[in-house]
Image (spheres, coloured by chain):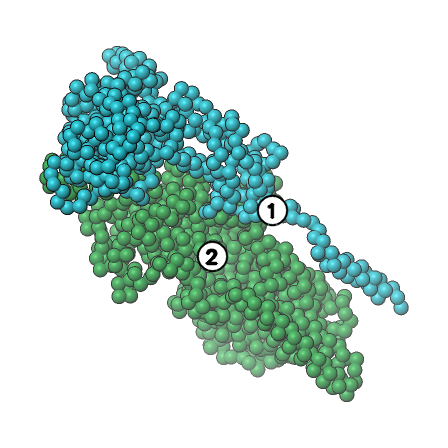
Chain colours: A green, B cyan
Amino acid sequence: MATLESPPLGTPSAMRSAFGTVLSALILLLIGVLAFSIRLFSVIKYESVIHEFDPYFNYRVTQFLSKNGIYEFWNWFDDRTWYPLGRVIGGTVYPGLTLTAGTIWWALNAINIPLSVETVCVFTAPVFSAFASWATYLLTKEVKGSGAGLAAAALLAMVPSYISRSVAGSYDNEAVAIFALIFTFYLYIKTLNTGSLFYATLNAIAYFYMVCSWGGYTFIINLIPMHVLLCIVTGRYSPRLYIAYAPLVVLGTLLAALVPVVGFNAVLTSEHFASFLVFIIIHVVALVYYIKGILSPKMFKVAVTLVVSIGLVVCLIVVAVLVALVASSPTGGWSGRSLSLLDPTYASKYIPIIASVSEHQPPTWPSYFMDINVLAFLVPAGIIACFSPLSDASSFVVLYIVMSVYFSGVMVRLMLVLAPAACIMSGIALSQAFDVFTASIKYQLGRSANSKDDAEDNTSTNNAPKDDSSSGKTDKGEEVAKERPSKKGKKKEREPADKPSVKSKILKKRALVLPLEASIVALLLLIMLGAFYVIHCVWAAAEAYSAPSIVLTSQSRDGLHVFDDFRESYAWLSHNTDVDDKVASWWDYGYQTTAMANRTVIVDNNTWNNTHIATVGTAMSSPEKAAWEIFNSLDVKYVLVVFGGLIGYPSDDINKFLWMVRIGGGVFPHIKEADYLRDGNYRIDSEATPTMLNCLMYKLSYYRFVETDGKGYDRVRRTEIGKKNFKLTHFEEVFTSHHWMVRIYKLKPQKNRIRGRAKKLKLKTSSGLDSKPAKKNPWI
Amino acid sequence: MMNLSRSVALISLFLLPLLSFSFSVDNPTDRRVLVLLDDLSLKSTHSIFFNTLKSRGFDLDFKLAEDSKLALQRYGHYLYDGLIIFAPSTERFGGSLDSKSIADFVDSGRDLILSADTSASDLIRGIATECGVDFDEDSSAMVIDHSSFSVSDVDGDHTLIAADDLVKSDAILGKTKIEAPVLFRGVAHSLNPTNNLVLKVLSASPSAYSANPSSKLSSPPQLTGSAISLVSVMQARNNARVVISGSLQLFSDRLFRSGVQKAGSPNKYEKSGNEQFVTELSKWVFHERGHLKAGSLVHHRVGETDEPAIYRIKDDLEFAVEILEWSGKSWEPYVADDVQVQFYMMSPYVLKTLSTDKKGMFHTSFKVPDVYGVFQFKVEYEKLGYTTLSLSKQIPVRPYRHNEYERFIPTAYPYYGACFTTMAGFFVFSFVYLYHK
């Protein structure tokens, strides 16, 4: 792009810049291919299936969209979930991912590439991770030049944290949202650098796409105001900042309010208030600067005192109104998930349903090394690099990394937001380090060979990226120059200043040269670091993060075992039950049941109604008869439990059971957690409490379990179960999968007759007379 | 092979007429009834009762209770639609019959008349218990009533009771009122008050008690007063009907014919109420009366005829259901003013009494509540003596579509105005700013 502008074609610098552009385009293409292909391990090792839980819902929604069109999707009232409440899907779902995949599917079909919806869904995430790495390149290029951009893009293409959410088949909101997030930030920085209203508008549209895609958009609408505030406080206010921010708030808020799931929340909830507050502040600041320009210094002082006193009063009023508004809502206007970001202990204290989700837990230290690996060491170097020199753009990425580190420490899920920031920082660090080392090697070699720079450039083509980064500087300068003359003549004086600045930089670099040996060793070490990162990433993509979790495998001495119990039992449900039958299970399996078995469920992974979930939790923690009554009142026909005791599958319902008790007890106080614990320990062996041994979950999990090995040894809890031989009175087992992972029970119908109180009579007669027929059937 | 196919053909030829008459949804009255007796002489001593049944078209098959060839079903099909057990002293049935198979017989929707008597066997008591009826545990106890005995009671121990405390239900006992008291001599039984499937048809008077009449009363009797039931009925959840009587004599020719005068009452009747009582009760138990059938639930929007797949909130809808009553020979329209429909989602949001057109159609119309969700039309009709109707039909109710809301709200006109004046103002401002020097 810059090559077209640079004057005389054929000069060495123009050639070099053209070569660099082509090379970086090629590298970017390869990065895209890398980002796509590293995510295909799941398809190669398993099969092309949708993964986990939420993706099944998204898949089902996409199917509906592709079948019925966008208006039906918008107005979709789903009567097969949250029975009997139903769920208005169109108004409660972030439609970005679905619309994206639906559009891709439609476009492919329109050009006669008849892919199935499922295929499109499976490969949406890898495609968008390629886009995300390109967006990272753009963003980092805006911050520190294209060398850093390429390094950051390459790092992001394979960062494990992002891979964990975007392998083929992981069809979740985050897949497209991370791209949208980075791209929005890129456009913000671009607007900030150029002051172009065109980019500001694009920025608002990118923000709209982000709002469509993921609830994490609040991160953007809080981070950008924070950066604006930072710029104002540090005296970096400029019209470019105003253009970057004000249109985003106005257009962005208007657009966000168009997304049904956000709607009036865009102006009503506290998550968005920061942006409005900063919107007011930036106007005040802009006004102050304007007035300062037209008034004499003395007049200005008078005006300041006047405005400050009036402004204080207005601010106080606004704050008072805001406080009153916020205080009038029960949660103070903050949703539970957001509150748990500010106070990490909030959720576990007050909202068990949020705390019960493992990805809402704070991460452990090892998970940082697992998810961002060597980036954790490079980030500080990147931060330092950002401070020399500090620009608007680099201060933004510093703020971004600081905020995302904080948030990732609160919730393991937000590690995903940290990953791009860490990649950008590490990209900058790597690029700067390469810059310094290669420049000093070049200088040292040049001094010894006493030759010219030009000769060296021809020989050291393999150092192209770092050359790029230095030329990226000029690119950027030129680009800025290119934009500005068309807009404002004011910046024109800067253009000639660019060339000398490059010269002076070279001079400066000469002062920073390192010894040749140290540079070479450091370079090698850096390359090794990169190599370890690549090895780790490939390992993580291949081994750790590509399991679809609906199919499990385990490697043992006698070969590979595949556990396909989930699909086996969902298929059983869809083939053996009536289409309107209701299936109750813990909410984790709701999405899969509706998507794979096409049966109505009571609760699912969209945990919008706590009471309903608590009802199911209460049923699971109640004795059989009470549970039967609860389920019967919900028209439930089948109860599905997941049991890992036979094969040692640890995330089964017994391990989740305490959460059911807590969530149930939160609404129905007769369920008390203490009743299920023996001296504060959760156990299912013979020491377990009678409440525990008689609750429905225990019974449904361990019914007939003793028949497997004769003593009922649970391989997950590593103990023998407490109650082994028991019969079910109100439920009957209808299906148990091959490895007992899924067990399905049917509610017995109400008894046809009610017996008299004959117990006493029976005992009496059996001692006295011959009572064979009476003894024969204890059942009826 | 030939042999087999021929025998199959033979069996089907033999079964065909049987099947066509057998108990079915369309023809609920029983046809084939097995009568188990512990003594074949009962056939003559209770001939009136049996003859009325025969005259009503029942096909009675008398068997001794100990008959070793007894079987209720063959090849998985029941051979009988009804069962009368007049064998109070039988300790064990012959053949494959036991209390479980009789319970299964009831659970398959078939009917039973069970009569115990003094010193009833444990088998009979066991069957009664299965049906929710508890006979007095003292096997020698009888119902004694010193105030409402029959004056014809020659023994003087006041065990022949003239009971007139009948359940008030036209469905069970017919429209004609039973004037004369019913004579009863036998054991008492009690019902669990929480059991809503069983019902006392003939209760003892408050002065009755259950004790051994030949021995002296040492301790207070366990069963007293109107807690004692003399004859009870049970209608199971699948509408199988059971009559349990504490007296076999109740059905006998002797008590059918004898006159009755209740002690302390001036009214003397030529004939006891037994025959009418037993006949009417047998009509009920064999589904000649009080059997309802409902057609499917029909609903549609007002002004339309097709049933929609989904309603919208605040839709106006019409609901109808056809209910017919079995008269013993044909289905007649059922007429009642107490049939209700619920529009139900966890709790009834709409509860409306249906009006009838006297031709069997019950209908109403109402507005769908302003709540979306998966609703059910529910008709739960439980009327004393009638079969239970429990019908439900699921129907989702959706919120407004995006284009079904009001386009312009009157209260918002100031905002529309503000919107358009701002736009116009901006246009004017731009024009002036750009072209005015």
Where, quadrant-wise, is the C terminus of chain A in this rendering? top left
Q: Residue A386: tell me if it is visible.
A: yes
Residue located at (56% from left, 67% from top): A328
Left or right of A645, for residue B436: right
* Secondary element type, mark 1: loop
Name the element at disc 2. helix
- In the rendered structure, the answer to whether residue A238 lies left or right of residue A186 reads right
Check the image and report above or below for B52 versus B417.
above
**At 70% across and 82% down in the image, what residue appears?**
A309
Which residue is painted at 82% across and 64% down in the image? B429
Q: Which residue lies furthest to the front in this view?
A: B266
Left or right: where B164 falls relative to A440? left
Dot 2: few (<14), some (14–19), or many (≥20) neighbours within 10 Å?
many
- The three-letter code of the residue at mark 2 reads Arg
Q: Quadrant of residue A182?
A: bottom right
Q: Where is residue A98 in the image (x, y as percent from the top left)?
A: 55, 49
The image shows a total of numbered marks equal to 2
Instruction: State the residue at coordinates (33%, 50%).
Output: A626
Q: Amino acid type of disc 1? A: Tyr
Instruction: Identify the residue under disc 2.
Output: A165
Q: Front-most of A284 and A557?
A: A284
The chain carrying label 2 is A
Q: Do labels 2 and 1 share a chain?
A: no
Q: Mark 1 points at which residue?
A: B400
Q: How far apart are labels 2 and 1 at the CA level? A: 36 Å
The chain containing the residue under callout 1 comes to B
Mark yes or no: residue A170 visible: no
Q: Where is residue A473 in the image (x, y as percent from the top left)?
A: 63, 70
Q: Which mark is residue A366?
A: none
Q: How crowded is mark 1: few (under 14 residues within 10 Å), some or many (20 or more)?
A: some
Q: Where is residue B412 in the image (x, y as percent from the top left)?
A: 71, 56
A694 or A389, nearer to the observer: A694
